[in-house]
């Protein structure tokens, strides 16, 4: 789902949630499991999972499955964006989420914007 299709209020509510911000800050440094997030952020496991679900809904985090030495599988979560810019344009708020993999697209967009001025 492109960022433009998402409700600005919903994205701001998600980013504005204190627990979601703590989770994002923790996984911004390195990928972590839900258990690690619970311990580091001093949040209950159900609270961590609710925030993970919220953040995944807006594609702000991703997960991957790892295999422990004992053969058990577990997920780690990591940030899926580099930065977020909130701007006011023509009396409307806009949220732009910059992702690492979108660098060529961002360059093309910037080039197009420069050409249209």
Image (tube, rainbow, N blue to C red):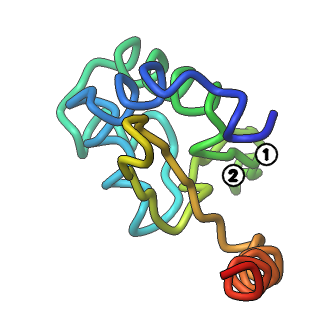
- Residue that appears at 35% across and 16% down: 47
Q: Residue 71 carries which label?
A: 1
Q: Nearer the viewer, residue 20 or 75?
A: 20
Marks 2 and 1, Cα distance to the nearest angstrom?
5 Å
Determine the secondary structure under disc 1: loop
* Disc number placed over residue 68 in the picture, else none: 2
In depth, the one of 89 and 54 nearer the eye is 89
Q: What element carries label 2?
A: loop
- Place of residue 22 in the rendered image (x, y in percent of width and height, measured from the top left): 26, 42
Dot 2, crowdedness within 10 Å: few (<14), some or many (≥20)? few
Q: Give the residue displayed 52% in from the left and 68% down from the top.
A: 82
Please state which of residues 49 and 87 is positioned toward the viewer in this rendering.
87
The answer to which image quadrant residue 14 occupies is top left
Q: Cβ–Cβ below 8 Å for labels 2 and 1?
A: yes
Horizontal side of 18 relative to 92 (left or right) equals left
| On-image quarter of the N terminus | top right
Q: Is residue 92 left or right of residue 106?
A: left
């Amino acid at each position: 789902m492109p960022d433009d299709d998402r409700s600005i209020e919903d994205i701001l509510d998600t980013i504005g949630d204190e627990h979601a911000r703590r989770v994002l800050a923790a996984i911004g440094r390195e990928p972590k499991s839900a258990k690690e997030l619970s311990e580091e952020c001093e949040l209950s496991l159900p609270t961590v999972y609710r925030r993970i679900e919220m953040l995944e809904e807006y594609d702000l985090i991703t997960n991957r499955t790892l295999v422990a030495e004992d053969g058990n599988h577990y997920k780690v979560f990591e940030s899926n964006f580099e930065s977020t810019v909130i701007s006011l344009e023509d009396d409307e708020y806009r949220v732009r989420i910059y992702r690492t993999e979108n660098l060529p697209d961002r360059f093309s967009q910037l080039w197009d914007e420069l050409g249209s001025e």
